[in-house]
Amino acid sequence: MIKNREKSGIPILIDLLSNPKYFQSAKIDLENITRQRFGDLPPIISKKMLEEYIKKWKTWWEENKDTFKFPEEKE
């Protein structure tokens, strides 16, 4: 979805943040695609820290999903 520049892939990546197996790749993809960063997390985090981090992404997406445009691709 992301390679095809479909915005519907962004909430999926946000949901994947809650899965330890996919967290890092979802975080990197979200930051690269959206050009947004909500800070780095230490290697060991509490459930509350993770929930707060995911909430930042969810809030950002709710506020920006209607106007979000994928960045221009580099040739």
Image (tube, helix red, strand yellow):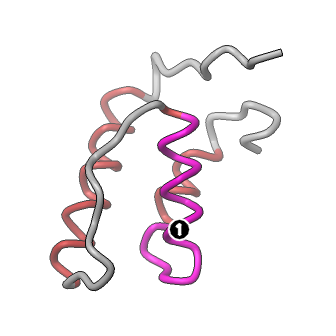
Q: Between 14 and 29, which is closer to the camera in this rendering? A: 29
Q: Which residues are magenta?
A: 16-33
Residue annotated with mark 1: 16
Callout 1, which amino acid?
A: Leu
As helix, strand or loop, the secondary structure at mark 1 comes to helix
Decide: is 50 above or below 34: below
Left or right: 14 in relation to 21:
left
Q: Position of residue 4 (x, y in %)?
A: 82, 34
Residue drawn at (71%, 34%) of the image: 6
Q: How many marks?
A: 1
Dominant secondary structure (helix, strand or loop) of the stretch shown in magenta: helix
Task: Please check the rendered image and state whether residue 64 is part of the magenta-colored stretch, yes or no.
Answer: no
Task: Please check the rendered image and state whether residue 22 is part of the magenta-colored stretch, yes or no.
Answer: yes
Residue drawn at (64%, 46%) of the image: 9
Left or right: 14 in relation to 46:
right
Q: Quadrant of the N terminus?
A: top right
Left or right: 27 in relation to 61:
right
Q: Position of residue 67 (x, y in %)?
A: 46, 16
Residue drawn at (48%, 64%) of the image: 15
Decide: is 44 above or below 50: below
Q: Position of residue 14 (x, y in %)?
A: 47, 57
Q: Quadrant of the C terminus?
A: top right
Label 1: how many Cα within 10 Å (few below 14, some 14–19, many 20+): some
Q: Between 39 and 12, which is closer to the camera in this rendering? A: 39
Left or right: 5 in relation to 25:
right
Residue drawn at (29%, 58%) of the image: 40
